[in-house]
Image (cartoon, rainbow, N blue to C red):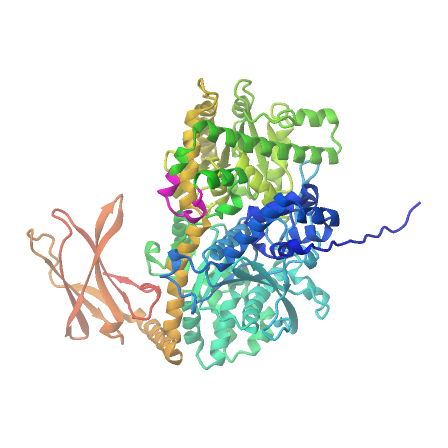
């Protein structure tokens, strides 16, 4: 007998006593407040899991009886009232003291644009690191009480969910999301009208609906083109995150960048600082320039004004992470849009030119030229990005160009295990307000060693239970026999937390070298199979559906895991998401990261592990290059001088295995007479106490406020003053510099002294043909420094003064005061200067004598 199956959802009536629980369910604050999530878990654990930890769906499907009983349960109601009280207190908080002097909450507003946001697994508009970083950024902005809005896209299918078949092949599955299940509602104007915006793409109009999500103190605005009034091809623009081809990608980025500006304008929101988080949203620069051109500015003046208030963060040195289109593609998709601008489109297209050629339109190049504040996401990455993007400032030494860095951080309340939070609540009480206080976290040492070890082992046991469930589910689905599944699960079915567990979980991309451990199979097998010191290795992660080499890595690990010498010792988990990530980063003993230096921009998964007392074993790249202190983990020093990639991998794999054999495994199993390893606990505590204050997202966002948001808001206000005359002045001055600079000539005049007596000065004269520039347009300086290994390092500067005209030359003079006795090293140079510049070298022009 067969027939269609129907469903009906019988929704409960929320008891009046629990009325506030709907407010909790519709605020993304639940994604980082475990106390809020704990209420739903406590009501019905099984339903909570079935709903993928989605409180909105949970409340629609909860039993009326369960809710009614909870309303009469004194213990539950006491906890409910505590959570409501904490929630209300949180929303009464104002701007945090750490940023009060850097931003004006009444005048300033930051708009943060990103293609993905990873708040929680129940809100599937993220793929991985970039999105989770963006989610953590928003959470910290809310915690700090910043005037802040975020803008992105609302994907109907989001990113794919992953399964791995019996042959180790990744299978990508896309599932449509009912927006009624998400914590979003239509954004409305002050008059209650739902907001839609219309974006010109090719020769047609594309309508996007604007949705709003509340996330603590901040609002998130998301654009959606899956509307009946759009053509089928346009409805699918916002279907998949990073789905489709380049044609889909460019249309998504037009909707995000240009449509995102339209959305904020329609809502009456006027940011003073605009943060472009990766190049996907860089088209906003063109739209904001168009607005200013319509008000009467030239393109150059408009660009100066727009760039003054714009912050751009680049997140990867890997070429695939930088969107590059053909100029003719951009001209085609924006043809109708360009037709409405009274300016030559070729001038706009030049903003996307990069070192690859004038025919390409590089979104990173557009973002750099359209911003005056730029950063990488770690100290190492800042240096690498300075080199990569040096074509924007062609004459400036990359070390001095305007590219800076803010090292990424993770949102501690999101990723710190509940067990640690409970312990801190008892022992430290006010720890949530001290997340950036390094001295405060020294008190981690006050936790008794045996208690610390016991809690770590407890977290590992819970993690292994989750691992076992994942393994059984996958291999049962793929038809493996019970006997085979039992062999695979022999170390996880009855989790012995006594075993050393290594974790490797991240996106499977070739540069991350997930298979580096398998470089010497025989040696690695001996390490894992020592009967007295067993070791497990857990892998998880996704590869992009179009990344064939990345998928081959997954298949290779699957194949290794089923080899006789590795069965039960190596586990490959499917379906990696934020929920599984939270289990892994809190439960494993060692977090392994083996990127090819210097391609790991940051690597926040290691930070999430470190704050939970997990110890990092990583190549010194990304954040670990500044996080490793010799006591809080282990470092693999990159063999950067090794030109042959295969030999480099072999050398670093050897170092990795040597650390495991000679330090990590012996230290873990050095239990002494107390039943636990004191050496291990010491390093685990060092990991936690060193990383919580230095690598929290709160510290990260405070850095952004002080170094970028505050200065960008101030610089924008400066150039916008007096009906935008400063912006026009600066643009005109730069045009003059560009016209004259090639004809500027410098030479040293007079005798060049090589010795002087102690206590005297060295007279230096430089003659400059200014070619139409004035002395006010030029800074002439001497750099004092030292030469080490053939490289000059600046230690100080002294400025020249204009003293006289000699023929057609302007003569500048300096009486140099040497820094020390003995041999002094110095360099002489000149560059354009103007009081309205955001960075002294932003023109990209410099000459050396």
Which residues fall within the magenta stretch? Answer: 429-442
Instruction: Identify the image quadrant of residue 841.
Output: bottom left
Is residue 495 found inside the magenta-colored segment of the image?
A: no
- Residue 570, percent from left and from top: 60, 30
- Closer to us: 480 or 785: 480
- Residue 741, percent from left and from top: 31, 70
- Residue 186, percent from left and from top: 64, 66
Residue 789 in view (yes/no): yes
Q: Is residue 208 left or right of residue 307?
A: right
Relative to 569, say whether 586 is above or below.
Answer: below
Q: Residue at x 40, y 60 (%)?
A: 708
Instruction: Identify the image quadrant of residue 788.
Output: top left
Relative to 412, say whether 713 is above or below.
Answer: below
Is residue 431 found inside the magenta-colored segment of the image?
A: yes
Image quarter hosting the C terminus: bottom left
Q: Residue at x 65, y 54 (%)?
A: 17
Residue 514 in view (yes/no): no
All told, the count of numbered labels is 0
- Closer to us: 40 or 751: 40
């Amino acid at each position: 007998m067969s027939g269609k199956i129907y469903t009906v959802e019988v929704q409960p009536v929320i008891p009046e006593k629990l009325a506030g629980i709907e407010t909790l369910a519709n605020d993304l604050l639940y994604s980082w407040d475990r106390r809020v999530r704990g209420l739903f878990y406590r009501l019905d654990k099984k339903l909570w899991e079935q709903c993928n930890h989605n409180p909105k769906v949970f409340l629609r499907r909860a039993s009326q009886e369960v809710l009614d009983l909870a309303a009469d349960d004194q213990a539950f109601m006491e906890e409910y009232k505590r959570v409501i009280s904490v929630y209300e207190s949180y929303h009464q908080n104002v701007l945090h003291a750490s940023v009060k002097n850097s931003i004006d909450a009444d005048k300033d507003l930051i708009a943060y644009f990103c293609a993905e946001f990873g708040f929680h697994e129940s809100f599937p508009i993220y793929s991985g690191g970039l999105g989770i970083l963006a989610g953590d950024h928003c959470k910290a902005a809310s915690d700090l009480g910043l005037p802040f809005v975020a803008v992105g896209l609302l994907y109907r299918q989001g990113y794919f969910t992953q399964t791995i078949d019996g042959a180790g092949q990744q299978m990508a599955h896309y599932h449509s999301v009912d927006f009624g299940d998400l914590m979003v509602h239509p954004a409305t104007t002050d008059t209650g009208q739902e907001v839609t915006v219309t974006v010109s793409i090719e020769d047609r109009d594309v309508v996007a609906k604007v949705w709003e999500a509340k996330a603590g103190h901040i609002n998130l605005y998301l654009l959606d083109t899956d509307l009946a009034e759009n053509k089928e091809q346009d409805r699918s623009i916002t279907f998949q995150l990073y789905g489709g081809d380049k044609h889909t990608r460019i249309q998504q980025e037009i909707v995000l960048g240009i449509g995102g500006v339209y959305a904020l304008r329609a809502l009456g929101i006027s940011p003073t600082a605009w943060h472009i988080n990766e190049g996907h949203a860089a088209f906003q620069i063109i739209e904001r320039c168009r607005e200013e051109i319509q008000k009467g500015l030239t393109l150059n003046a408009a660009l100066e004004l727009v760039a003054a208030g714009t912050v751009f963060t680049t997140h990867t040195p890997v070429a695939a992470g930088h969107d590059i289109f053909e100029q003719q593609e951009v001209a085609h998709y924006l043809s109708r849009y360009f037709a409405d601008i009274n300016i030559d489109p070729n001038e706009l297209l030049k903003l996307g030119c990069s070192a690859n050629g004038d025919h390409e339109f590089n979104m990173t190049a557009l973002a750099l030229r359209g911003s005056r504040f730029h950063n990488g996401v770690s100290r190492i990455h800042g240096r690498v990005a300075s080199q990569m993007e040096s074509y924007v400032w062609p004459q400036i030494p990359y070390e001095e160009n305007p590219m800076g860095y803010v090292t990424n951080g993770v949102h501690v309340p999101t990723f710190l295990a509940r067990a640690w939070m409970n312990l801190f609540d008892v022992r430290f009480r006010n720890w949530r307000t001290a997340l950036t206080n390094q001295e405060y976290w020294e008190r981690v040492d006050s936790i008794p060693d045996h208690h610390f070890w016991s809690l770590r082992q407890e977290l590992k046991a819970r993690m292994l239970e989750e691992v076992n469930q994942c393994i059984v589910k996958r291999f049962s689905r793929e038809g493996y026999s019970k006997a085979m599944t039992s062999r695979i699960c022999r170390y996880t079915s009855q989790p012995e937390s006594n075993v050393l567990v290594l974790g490797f979980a991240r996106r499977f991309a070739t540069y991350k070298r997930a298979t580096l451990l398998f470089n010497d199979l025989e040696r690695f097998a001996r390490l894992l199979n020592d009967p007295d010191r067993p070791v497990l290795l857990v892998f998880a992660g996704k590869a992009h559906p179009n990344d064939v080499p990345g998928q081959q890595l997954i298949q290779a690990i699957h194949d290794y895991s089923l080899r006789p010498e590795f069965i039960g010792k190596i586990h490959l988990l499917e379906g990696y998401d934020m929920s599984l990530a939270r289990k892994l980063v809190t439960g494993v003993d060692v977090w392994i990261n083996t990127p090819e230096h210097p391609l790991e921009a940051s690597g926040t998964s290691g930070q999430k592990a470190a704050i939970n007392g997990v110890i990092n074993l990583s190549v010194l790249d990304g954040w670990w290059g500044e996080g490793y202190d010799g006591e809080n983990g282990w470092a693999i020093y990159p063999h950067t001088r090794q030109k042959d990639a295969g030999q480099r991998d072999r050398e670093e794999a050897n170092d990795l295995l040597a650390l495991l054999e000679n330090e990590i495994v012996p230290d873990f199993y050095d239990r002494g007479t107390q039943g636990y390893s004191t050496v291990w606990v010491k390093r685990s505590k060092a990991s936690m106490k060193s990383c919580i204050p230095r690598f929290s997202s709160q510290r990260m966002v405070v850095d952004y406020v002080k170094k970028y948001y505050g200065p960008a808001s101030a610089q924008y206000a400066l150039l916008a003053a007096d009906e935008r005359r400063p912006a026009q002045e600066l643009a005109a001055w730069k045009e003059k510099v560009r016209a004259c600079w090639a004809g500027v000539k410098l030479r040293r005049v007079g005798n060049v002294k090589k010795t002087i007596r102690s206590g005297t000065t060295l007279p230096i004269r430089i003659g400059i043909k200014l070619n139409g520039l004035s002395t006010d347009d030029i800074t002439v300086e001497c750099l004092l420094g030292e030469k080490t290994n053939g490289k000059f390092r600046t230690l100080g500067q002294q400025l020249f003064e204009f003293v006289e005209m000699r023929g057609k030359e302007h003569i500048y003079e300096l009486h140099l005061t040497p820094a020390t006795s003995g041999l002094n090293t110095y360099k002489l140079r000149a560059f354009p200067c103007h009081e309205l510049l955001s960075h002294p070298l932003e023109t990209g022009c410099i000459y050396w004598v």
